[in-house]
Structures are given as structure tokens and as C-alpha cells.
């Protein structure tokens, strides 16, 4: 028996796989760990397991994040990681090769686009169909993308933020910033070290961001989280209280660049489109949309009501899944198909 057709949301931070008629089959961090043996390398782990190893790897294991800024940065590792994901969901392409839909950022180079197609074909696809990520996000957020009235969606992922205006099933305008939630995490690591002589790992920094990462109109102490790290001043490990104020700069620096690009996008739109957005508001998707207060901050900065969709971490994948189930919807938004 053949395997059902698949949709893959290949994100910088997380990969989700949906099987036609089956539902979601996989939701794992896009992380891959390799054990470097004396004669050959082998798979050590992937997904959640591999992510939990970041910053605590034994000397013979290396942890990779093969996607950068929304695109494939390391082709071979991406392919190996996806093969492990497919093995986990007991995927086999040996009988009838399935069709695969894969989403990717809309402003990518031909080379980056080709890499996604190649990775799909190498996984055993009969055909790879590509869709634009912001389009998938808009569908997943429940927007009526076929309406002639315009909508704006902002998808803040791990390494990219995509801002798109959509009307009549097409993209009216799109911009991408190669910056996302993971950049906030990196800035947190940097600032804690520079301003407080305190060294934390990637996962601790992410934990801090999830717990006290917020953007607020008034700089006041709202939240504190206790974490562990290394105190450079005393040269010893230490427990440390981190407040939202201590990571404020980190959050703001990234959010400001996003706000700047959204303003740029708005300034280039036709007046009728702007009126549509004023009426309909702007929807936020992607894990980065979970920074608390972001919707309020954008509403205030842009003068257009901005809200977070129901399931920001799932939005793109929910939209992609719908295009897999609904051929008509797919053909109204699809980019070119590639068969082998
Ligand atoms: P991608 O599509 O690029 O894989 P995702 O949409 O899965 O990215 O979002 C991942 C990003 O969202 C990461 O930077 C992660 O730290 C961030 N994130 C996830 N949950 C939260 C949260 N509760 N608060 C703030 N950021 C979050
Ligand atoms: Mg994404």
C-alpha cells in the first residue's frame, strides 16, 4: 500500500508534517544530532531530543540546525533530518510515491527554492508542490484569502519574519526580514553576559524569553524568572533572577526592526488596500507572535488593530494542511509543480 500525500512545514525552528486524511503526524524542532564515530557517523537523535542537547553535547556528538532564516542552509543535514522524521512516522515511498506540498518563504532565491524541491524529491516524492508560507499562514489563521478585499498577515518565525498582504488568492505585497524569535534569544544571551556578567545557554535564554519576554508601553517591572547560569565575576555557577527589564533591550531591538518593515510595507500600499486593512486589522502568526504585549504594541505603533491568531505555532501548518485536502484551494494559490 502506498503512503498518503504529505504537507511539510519546514521551519527554521520547528518542522510539522501532515498526512492527507490522517492529520498531523509530526511536530518536532528542526534540530539534528550526529554521533561522530571513528569510521562513520550515525544518527544520534533528532527533534526534541536533539534540541535538548544544545549546549550540553558530549565531545563525539554534534548538534545541527540545518535551516537558517527560513531556508535550507545545510542540504545534506536537512535531508537526513527529514528522513529521520519520515522514519518516525513510518513513511515509506517504496510502493507508490506520494505527492508532497512544502511551504517556503516568498522572497527566496531560485537556488533556495530548488533546494526545497530537491529535498522533497530525494525523500521519494513523485511530485513536489510549493506554496508561499504567508499564504499558508493566512489560510491557517482563518482569513478569507480568496476575497477581493485585502488582509495582512505577519508570520514571526524562528529566523524570519514575513509580512504579506493578500487579496483574491494572491500576494499583493510581501516583505521579509531575516530576523525572528531566535534573534531575541541570541540577544538575551549577549545582553546578560555584557550587562550582568552572567552566562546562560541557548535553552535557558529561550526559557527566559518565554516566561518574561514582553513588550510593554511603560518600562516597569512585571515579571521575574529564576534560572541557573555562570557568574563571570565570581567565576562560579549561580542561581539568578531575570526580570523583563533585563531583557527589554533584546526584545525591543528585534521588535523595532519588525515594526519598521511593517511601516515600510504599509507606506507602499495602494490607498484602497490600506482601507481594507484598517477595517480588517492585521493578524500575527508564528511562535514569535507569542511575545506578550506584541499585539497591543503593534496596534499602537501602526494605528491598525493587530491581533494574534488562535494557534500561532500551528498557523502555517494548518493552512498547508488545508491546501493538501482541498485541491481547488491549492490550485488557486499554488506556485509551479515539479515532478521527477
Ligand atoms: P519557524 O516557523 O521559523 O520554525 P515557529 O513559528 O515555530 O518558527 O516559531 C519559533 C519561535 O517562536 C522560536 O524563536 C521560539 O522561541 C518562539 N516561541 C515559541 N513559543 C514562544 C512563547 N511562548 N513566547 C515567545 N516566543 C515563543
Ligand atoms: Mg514558520
Image (cartoon, helix red, strand yellow):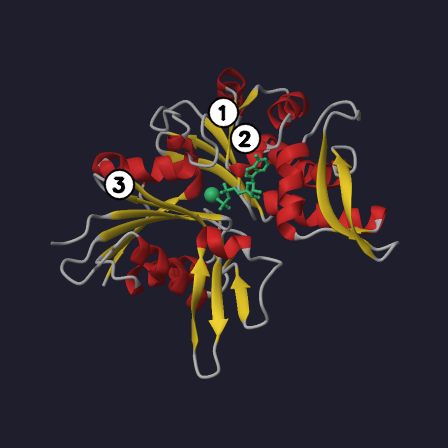
Q: Which mark is residue 312?
A: none
Q: Which residue is mark 3?
A: 324
Instruction: Residue 103 in the image: state x and y as whole percent.
Output: 38, 47
Q: Which mark is residue 273?
A: 1
Name the residue nearer the viewer: 32 or 75: 32
Q: CA distance from mark 3 to mark 2?
A: 31 Å
Question: Image quadrant of ligand 1?
Answer: top right
Look at the numbered discs 3 and 2 and tell me whether their residues touch, using CB distance below 8 Å: no
Whether residue 10 appears in this view of the structure is: yes
Horizontally, residue 140 falls left or right of residue 70, namely left
Name the residue nearer the viewer: 266 or 247: 247
Q: Which residue is mark 2?
A: 269
Instruction: Residue 250 in the image: state x and y as whole percent.
Output: 73, 41
Instruction: Residue 152 in the image: state x and y as whole percent.
Output: 49, 29
In the image, residue 2 sits, relative to residue 175, either above or below, namely below
SS at badge 1: helix
Amino acid at each position: 500500500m502506498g503512503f498518503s500525500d504529505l504537507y511539510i512545514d519546514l521551519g527554521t525552528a520547528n518542522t510539522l508534517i501532515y498526512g492527507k486524511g490522517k492529520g498531523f503526524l509530526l511536530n518536532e524542532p528542526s534540530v539534528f544530532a550526529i554521533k561522530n564515530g571513528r569510521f562513520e557517523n550515525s544518527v544520534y537523535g533528532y527533534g526534541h531530543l536533539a534540541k535538548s542537547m544544545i549546549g550540553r553535547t558530549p565531545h563525539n556528538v554534534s548538534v545541527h540546525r540545518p535551516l537558517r532564516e527560513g531556508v535550507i542552509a545545510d542540504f545534506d543535514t536537512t535531508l537526513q533530518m527529514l528522513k529521520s522524521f519520515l522514519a518516525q512516522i513510518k513513511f515509506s515511498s517504496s510502493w507508490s510515491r506520494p505527492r508532497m506540498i512544502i511551504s517556503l518563504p516568498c522572497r527566496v532565491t531560485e537556488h533556495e527554492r530548488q533546494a526545497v524541491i530537491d529535498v522533497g524529491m530525494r525523500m521519494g516524492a513523485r511530485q513536489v508542490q510549493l506554496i508561499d508560507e504567508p499564504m499558508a499562514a493566512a489560510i491557517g489563521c482563518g482569513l478569507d484569502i480568496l476575497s477581493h478585499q485585502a488582509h495582512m498577515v505577519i508570520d514571526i518565525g524562528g529566523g524570519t519574519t514575513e509580512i504579506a498582504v493578500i487579496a483574491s488568492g494572491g500576494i499583493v505585497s510581501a516583505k521579509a526580514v531575516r530576523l525572528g524569535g531566535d534573534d531575541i534569544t541570541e540577544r538575551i544571551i549577549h545582553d546578560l553576559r555584557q550587562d550582568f556578567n552572567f552566562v546562560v545557554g541557548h535553552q535557558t535564554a529561550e526559557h527566559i524569553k518565554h516566561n518574561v519576554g514582553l513588550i510593554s508601553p511603560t518600562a516597569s517591572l512585571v515579571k521575574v524568572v529564576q534560572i541557573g547560569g555562570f557568574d563571570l565575576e565570581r567565576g562560579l555557577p549561580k542561581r539568578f533572577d531575570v526580570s523583563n527589564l533585563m531583557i527589554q533591550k533584546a526584545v525591543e531591538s528585534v521588535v523595532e526592526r519588525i515594526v519598521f518593515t511593517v511601516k515600510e510595507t504599509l507606506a507602499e500600499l495602494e490607498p484602497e488596500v490600506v482601507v481594507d486593512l484598517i477595517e480588517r486589522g492585521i493578524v500575527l502568526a508564528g511562535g514569535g507572535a507569542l511575545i506578550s504585549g506584541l499585539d497591543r504594541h503593534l496596534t499602537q505603533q501602526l494605528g491598525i488593530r493587530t491581533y494574534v491568531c488562535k494557534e500561532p505555532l500551528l498557523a502555517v501548518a494548518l493552512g498547508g494542511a488545508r491546501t493538501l485536502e482541498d485541491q481547488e484551494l491549492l490550485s488557486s494559490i499554488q506556485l509551479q509543480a515539479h515532478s521527477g
